[in-house]
Image: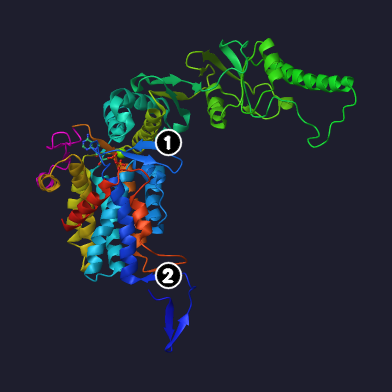
């Protein structure tokens, strides 16, 4: 690697001693290899038969997951190109809540195919243009092959929920959980004035509780708050209570924070304490006089104030989460009060409030007409189980909400990919020059999905693809892979239904990432540019490392097909 530029025969030094530089093919190969390492690290998790990964952080925390974005998020990646691919997964997660593994896998496959074209001296600009053309066409074809979903078609929507839970912790109790997800989304779905269907997921809160089976999870009206009453003498069950939400502490206000208190006699101390007690008593009186029976406070409550509140028969909880307060505001129809002295009538909300001793949870059900909000209470035996459950359910909520508002769904199990690939190949015939190669390479990359689904199910991916292509040539646009039997079936009818929005987004993110990597022809690094980064990208701390090499081989085979 040259750190010098030639100028009039004289070497001109423009980079520092330690910096390194890679150009053109070297730079491209380096970047492509890094991006592929990331892509290959998640491929083995794709689909219902995908494997899980165990991630061990530097602190020793263990996460077991199958979720692409979680895996990449927990991996300690310090290669800049690899990080760009990780961003694809994050964008996908933010935009769609699902399809992260698909997006990252396709990005890697696009780059693998690009590498072949670069080998044959096709200029990156032509490849990028071809990929862009193909991606745009593919998105159009997705719209073309997608079907409309009626927001009231509970069976179809449940299929979407179940498909999105595939391979996640939520899968074990898929029946129960998919039902809950659908109910939750339908509970917050409204028909807007302009005829659009609007789903407001802010009104769905997800709360987790360890100690029982995932199948015991439930959907509740209102909020569930994981807090204890501030004082043992407080009431624990109040029907039609007035609820105060407050985000300032119910404590003594230190008027002069830094002033030293000079106490010369026990009387003075007593006097001082009396004043403090007086202040707290006044605060509690203000609360009681407002008519509040229940108080959720985001900050601390002084011990003495807790005692006074208990004496007044008020149920209070301190240090509630800010997000809980925001949700409670919707549920009970209250304002969040910041200053007790300015407590206005009408700031309080109304709810039935019950504290469950055994579960150590508050159940708050709004009784106001304005009240809205439901809580998905997810249960699982251990923290690991509920964490993975929460991720899966969160994604399913996003996906189902999207399907209901976007109204478009697709046949999964590789069906849509094979169909869109077929259509993009037809489109390629009308594209001239070197871009045509890239458009076809894009179509090939889409078929990575059925190939990997098949591979992960222990099937022969070449056979699978041949069968699928044949079915689509015969006009079966929804023919996909049943990963459990290895047969080609109509996956739409079989209930493997995906969100069209997530798929469109996955193709966009994958193309963007691949093109971003291809555009780079020069790497100038301030430090060492060894291949260390690539290895890091492939090996999270405690992941079973063996899989990586094997996946590399599969990627190679993929490129050849
Ligand atoms: P992603 O992170 O991309 O969502 P997943 O591991 O969730 O990755 O796998 C999604 C893929 O698995 C999709 O292509 C989907 O169609 C497919 N899939 C899900 N359930 C089934 C099923 N029962 N049979 C076949 N394919 C399925
Ligand atoms: Mg998924």
Depth check: 79 or 24 in front? Answer: 79
Q: Which mark is residue 20?
A: 2
Q: Secondary structure at mark 2?
A: strand
For image coordinates 84% across by 31% down, the residue present is 261
Above or below, 131 against 23 in this view is above
Pick the front one: 170 or 351: 170
Q: Quick check: which quadrant has ligand 2?
A: top left
Tag 1's secondary structure?
A: loop
Question: Could you tell me if the residues under marks 1 and 2 are in contact, i.e. CB atoms within 8 Å?
Answer: no
| Image location (x, y in percent) of residue 360 | 51, 17
Q: Residues within 10 Å of mark 1 (few under 14, many from 20)?
A: few
The stretch in magenta equals 468-493
Residue 282 shows which numbered tag? none
Disc nearer the start of the sequence (1/2): 2
Residue at the image point whose x is 27% and y is 57% from the top: 110
Mark 2 Cα within 10 Å, few/some/many (few <14, many 20+)? some
| Looking at the image, residue 235 lies above or below residue 44 | above
**Image position of 411 with respect to 510: above or below:** above
Q: Nearer the viewer, residue 76 or 301?
A: 76
Where is residue 326? Give x, y as percent. Answer: 55, 30
**For this view, does 111 lie left or right of residue 283?**
left
Instruction: Report the Cα–Cα distance between label 1 and label 2.
Output: 58 Å
**Residue 196 drawn in magenta:** no
The answer to if 484 sits in the magenta stretch is: yes
Q: Residue 194 — which label?
A: 1
Above-or-below relation of 377 to 544: above
Disc 1 beta carbon < 8 A from ligand 2? no
**Where residue 292 sits in the image (x, y, percent)?**
65, 16
Left or right, 527 with respect to 37, comes to right
Q: Quadrant of the N terminus?
A: bottom left
């Amino acid at each position: 690697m040259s750190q010098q530029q030639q100028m009039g025969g004289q070497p001109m030094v423009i980079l520092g001693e330690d910096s390194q530089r890679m150009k053109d093919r070297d730079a491209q190969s380096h970047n492509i290899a890094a991006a592929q390492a990331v892509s290959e690290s998640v491929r083995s998790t794709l689909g219902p038969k995908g494997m899980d990964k165990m991630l061990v952080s530097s602190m020793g925390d263990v996460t077991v997951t199958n979720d692409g974005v979680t895996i990449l998020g927990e991996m300690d990646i310090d290669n800049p190109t690899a990080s760009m691919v990780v961003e694809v997964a994050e964008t996908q997660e933010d935009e769609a809540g699902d399809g992260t593994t698909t997006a990252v896998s396709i990005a890697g496959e696009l780059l693998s195919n690009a590498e072949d074209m670069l080998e044959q001296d096709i200029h990156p600009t032509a490849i990028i243009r071809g990929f862009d053309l193909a991606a745009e066409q593919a998105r159009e074809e997705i719209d073309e092959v997608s079907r409309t979903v009626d927001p009231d078609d509970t069976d179809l929507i449940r299929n979407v929920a179940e498909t999105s839970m595939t391979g996640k912790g939520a899968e074990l109790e898929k029946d129960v959980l998919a039902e809950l997800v659908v109910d939750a989304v339908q509970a917050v779905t409204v028909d807007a004035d302009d005829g659009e269907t609007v789903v407001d997921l802010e009104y769905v809160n997800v709360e987790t509780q360890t100690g029982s089976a995932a199948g015991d999870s439930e959907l509740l009206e209102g909020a569930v708050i994981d807090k204890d009453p501030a004082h043992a003498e407080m009431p624990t069950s109040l029907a039609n209570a007035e609820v105060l939400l407050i985000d300032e502490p119910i404590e003594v206000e230190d008027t002069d924070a830094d002033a030293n208190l000079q106490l010369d006699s026990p009387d003075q101390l007593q006097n001082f304490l009396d004043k403090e007690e007086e202040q707290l008593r006044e605060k509690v009186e203000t609360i009681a006089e407002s008519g509040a029976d229940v108080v959720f406070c985001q900050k601390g409550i002084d011990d003495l104030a807790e005692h006074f509140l208990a004496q007044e028969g008020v149920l209070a909880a301190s240090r509630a989460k800010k997000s809980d307060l925001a949700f409670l505001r919707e549920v009970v129809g209250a304002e969040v009060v910041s200053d007790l002295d300015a407590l206005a009538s009408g700031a309080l909300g109304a709810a039935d409030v019950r504290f469950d001793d055994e579960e150590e949870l508050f159940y708050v059900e709004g009784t106001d007409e304005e009240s809205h909000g439901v809580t998905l209470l997810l249960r699982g035996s251990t923290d690991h189980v509920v964490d993975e459950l929460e991720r899966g359910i969160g994604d399913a909520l996003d996906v189902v909400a999207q399907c209901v508002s976007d109204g478009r769904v697709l046949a999964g199990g590789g069906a849509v990919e094979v169909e869109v690939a077929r259509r993009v190949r037809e489109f390629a015939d009308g594209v001239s020059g070197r871009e045509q190669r890239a458009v076809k390479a894009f179509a090939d990359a889409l078929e990575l999905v059925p190939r990997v689904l098949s591979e992960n199910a222990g099937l022969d991916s070449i056979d699978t693809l041949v069968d699928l292509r044949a079915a689509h040539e015969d006009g079966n646009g929804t023919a996909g892979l049943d990963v459990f039997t290895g047969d080609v079936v109509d996956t739409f009818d079989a209930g493997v239904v995906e969100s069209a929005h997530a798929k469109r987004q996955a193709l966009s993110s994958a193309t963007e990432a691949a093109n971003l990597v291809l555009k780079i022809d020069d790497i100038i690094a301030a430090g060492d540019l060894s291949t260390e980064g690539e290895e890091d990208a492939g090996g999270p701390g405690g992941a079973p490392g063996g899989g990586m090499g094997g996946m590399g081989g599969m990627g190679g085979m993929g490129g050849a097909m």
